[in-house]
C-alpha cells in the first residue's frame, strides 16, 4: 500500500507552501485523496512522479 502524505509534508519535501501544494492538486499535477472536507492526502508515488516530470535540471 502506498504511503499517504499530508499537504504540509509534501510542501516541506518540495520546499514550497501548503497552498501551492493544494493548487498543484487542484490543477491535476498531483494526485490526491480527500477523506473529509478538510483532510487532503497525496500518495508518495504521486510526489515522486511529479518530481521526475517537473524537476529543474542544471
Image: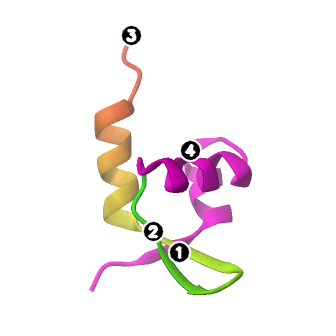
The extreme top residue here reads: 58
Dot 2 crowding, Cα within 10 Å, few <14, some 14–19, many 20+: many
* Comparing labels 2 and 3, the label whose residue is closer to the camera: 2
Q: Residue 42 at what x, y percent from top left?
A: 47, 68
Badges 1 and 4: C-beta atoms under 8 Å apart? Answer: no
Left or right, 49 with respect to 47, comes to left
Q: Residue at (37%, 32%) from the top-left corner? A: 54
22 vs 44, nearest the viewer: 22
Q: Earlier in the sequence, mark 1 or mark 3?
A: 1
How far apart in space, not on screen, are marks 4 and 2 (Cα)?
16 Å
Q: Which residue is mark 3?
A: 58
Badges 4 and 2: C-beta atoms under 8 Å apart? Answer: no
Q: Which residue is mark 1?
A: 41
Residue stretch in magenta: 1-29
- Mark 3 lies on a secondary structure that is loop
Check the picture and name the quadrant holding the C terminus: top left
Badges 2 and 1: C-beta atoms under 8 Å apart? Answer: yes
Left or right, 23 with respect to 30, comes to right
Q: Earlier in the sequence, mark 2 or mark 3?
A: 2
Q: Which residue is mark 4?
A: 14
- Mark 4 lies on a secondary structure that is helix
Q: Which mark is residue 32?
A: 2
Amino acid at each position: 500500500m502506498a504511503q499517504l502524505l499530508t499537504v504540509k509534508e509534501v510542501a516541506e519535501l518540495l520546499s514550497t507552501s501548503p497552498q501551492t501544494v493544494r493548487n498543484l492538486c487542484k490543477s491535476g499535477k498531483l494526485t490526491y485523496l480527500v477523506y473529509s472536507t478538510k483532510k487532503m492526502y497525496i500518495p508518495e508515488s504521486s510526489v515522486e512522479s511529479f518530481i521526475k516530470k517537473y524537476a529543474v535540471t542544471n
